[in-house]
Amino acid sequence: MKVGRITLSDRASAKIYKDRSGPRIDHVLREVFGPDVEIEPVMLPDDRDRISDTLRELADHRRCDLIVTTGGTGIGPRDVTPEATRAVLEKELPGFGEILRVTAFEKVPTTILSRATAGVRGHCLIVNLPGKPEAVAECLAILMPAIHEGLAYLRDEDPHAQP
């Protein structure tokens, strides 16, 4: 299992503050997929073209099964992650973002400002997460059943087969 993890933040990429969301994602993914999961961490500023290019590189050339992004999903002028993601997707999976917004709404009403999405490029599942470290684990817990099933379909496996 190979995972690309992209932290998107102007300030973290400029080392103004430490990335806490990326390592949190790594921790959760190792808990779920085991310690042998190969994670390729990337840190980028909020730059649409660089994000799209990196998604293509991770999906097409480094052959990641899953790419998880964190950050850049809000409505600020530099928040461009959903647009950069959509530019590379072959199939969009809007249900990922929809369920995150609905599930988190009662706890954090401003979650409806999130524009996170997900989709498929080739045999790679790409998922946008928010940039707040405390939200990362909660979001992954909500999405993990769909991530598992999506990865099985992309590997042409029966996700409902009994071991």
Image (cartoon, grey):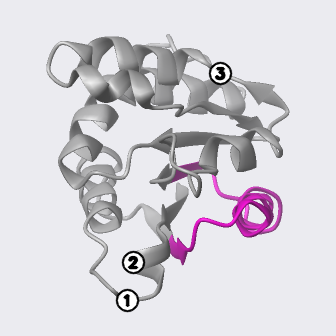
Q: Is residue 119 left or right of residue 49?
A: left
Residue position for label 2 = 12
Please provide percent x and percent y for residue 61. 81, 67
Helix, strand or loop at label 3? It is loop
Residue at 37% in and 29% down: 144
Q: Which residue is mark 1?
A: 15
Residue 93, labelled with which disc?
Answer: 3
Q: Amino acid at mark 2?
A: Ala
Residue under the image location 33 percent in, 36 percent down: 140
**Label 3 to label 1: alpha-carbon separation:** 33 Å
Q: Is residue 58 left or right of residue 87?
A: left
Residue at figure coordinates x 85%, y 33% from the top left = 90
The segment highlighted magenta reads 41-68
Position in image of residue 83 (x %, y %): 72, 43
Of residues 66 and 76, the one nearer the viewer is: 76
| Mark 3 nearby-residue class (10 Å; few <14, some 14–19, many ≥20) | some
Asked if 29 appears above or below 105 in the picture, the reply is below
Q: Amino acid at mark 1?
A: Lys
